[in-house]
Image (tube, helix red, strand yellow):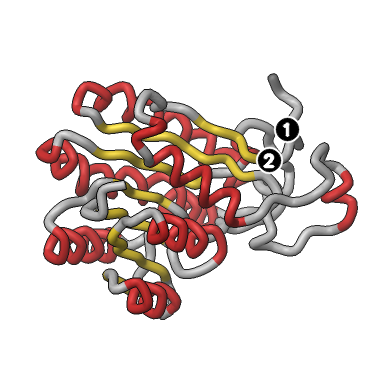
């Protein structure tokens, strides 16, 4: 691994985001992290990287993150778009504000980041993206209408982007986690998983790191389900 490689991770201070940050650091990446709390600042300090407090729903915060990364490192090789969970509720009980927040969190954040960073990657001649999504983008859950609907749209955007910029040696893929230990889960959930357990944040982190690596150099535009077999589609 080239120690000069630089990765941005959003919502990188806790849960899956923290695990991804730690894995990329182990693999030699220089890191730029953002989260809504000081967790990213503390982790970045530990890694000797860039840490900025901000929200993926705010265009100005994303611009600050990209600018700080380029000022510090002069390049951006990898981006992991990770977010908190959007509002939950019944299909018709969620109001316009909840849907708009979800759109800003799950799609517009990625659109904004691609606008900011794609020219940098084009100039470098290389770049890779991973968007952390959900298995429910393929198999919708009534309890997660905003997440399911918009992350299905994210898969479409990712495919469009991957096809458009493949010639520039820029790749984009999605990781679709199932039930992961970053959140508590009831026993019946565990029993519904063919592997008989929830996944770990470290497993999602390692999958993400692989998709960013040269070993996945011919993989782009894909949505990889990492769910222990819980989804039933083939």
Q: Which mark is residue 190?
A: none
Could you classify mark 2 by the number of other residues whose Cα lies within 10 Å: few (under 14), some (14-19), or many (20 or more)?
many
Q: Picture coordinates of residue 105 (x, y %)?
A: 44, 54
Asked if residue 187 lies left or right of residue 205, the reply is: right
Q: Are marks 2 and 1 in contact (CB under 8 Å)?
A: yes
CA–CA distance in space, label 2 to label 1 = 7 Å
| Residue 149 higher or lower than 88, as above or below | above
- Tally the numbered discs: 2
Q: Nearer the viewer, residue 91 or 80?
A: 80
Q: Picture coordinates of residue 62 (x, y %)?
A: 28, 60
| Residue 166 higher or lower than 184, as above or below | above
Could you classify mark 1 by the number of other residues whose Cα lies within 10 Å: few (under 14), some (14-19), or many (20 or more)?
some
Residue drawn 35% across the image and 41% down it: 129
- Per the image, the residue denoted by label 1 is 231
- Per the image, the residue denoted by label 2 is 227
- For the residue labelled by badge 1, is the local secondary structure a helix, a strand or a loop? loop
Residue drawn 37% across the image and 77% down it: 46
Q: Nearer the viewer, residue 217 or 148?
A: 217
Asked if residue 30 lies left or right of residue 151, the reply is: left
Q: Picture coordinates of residue 205 (x, y %)?
A: 52, 51
Asked if residue 124 lies left or right of residue 105, the reply is: left
- Looking at the image, is mark 2 or mark 1 nearer the viewer? 2
Residue drawn 51% across the image and 61% down it: 19
| Residue 223 higher or lower than 57, as above or below | above
Q: Nearer the viewer, residue 205 or 139?
A: 205
Check the picture and name the quadrant holding the C terminus.
Answer: top right
Residue drawn 68% across the image and 62% down it: 183
| Residue 97 higher or lower than 167, as above or below | below
Q: Picture coordinates of residue 207 (x, y %)?
A: 52, 43
Q: Nearer the viewer, residue 197 or 155?
A: 197
- For the residue labelled by badge 2, is the local secondary structure a helix, a strand or a loop? loop
């Amino acid at each position: 691994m080239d120690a000069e490689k630089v990765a941005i991770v959003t919502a990188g201070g806790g849960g899956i985001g923290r695990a991804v940050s730690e894995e990329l650091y182990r693999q030699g990446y220089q890191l730029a992290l953002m989260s809504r709390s000081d967790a990213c600042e503390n982790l970045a300090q530990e890694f000797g990287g860039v840490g900025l407090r901000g929200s993926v729903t705010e265009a100005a915060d994303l611009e600050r993150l990209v600018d700080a990364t380029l000022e510090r490192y002069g390049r951006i090789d990898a981006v992991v778009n990770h977010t908190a969970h959007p509002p939950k509720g019944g299909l018709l009980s969620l109001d316009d504000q909840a849907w708009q927040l979800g759109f800003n969190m799950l799609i517009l954040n990625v659109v904004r980041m691609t606008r900011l960073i794609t020219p940098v990657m084009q100039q470098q001649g290389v770049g890779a993206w991973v968007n952390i999504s959900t298995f429910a983008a393929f198999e919708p859950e009534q309890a997660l209408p905003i997440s399911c609907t918009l992350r299905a749209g994210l898969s479409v955007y990712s495919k469009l982007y991957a096809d458009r910029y493949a010639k520039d040696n820029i790749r984009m893929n999605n990781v679709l986690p199932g039930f992961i230990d970053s959140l508590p889960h009831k026993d019946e959930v565990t029993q519904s998983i063919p592997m008989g357990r929830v996944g770990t944040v470290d497993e999602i982190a390692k999958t993400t790191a692989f998709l960013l690596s040269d070993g996945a150099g011919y993989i782009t535009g894909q949505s990889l389900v990492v769910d222990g077999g819980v989804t039933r589609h083939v």
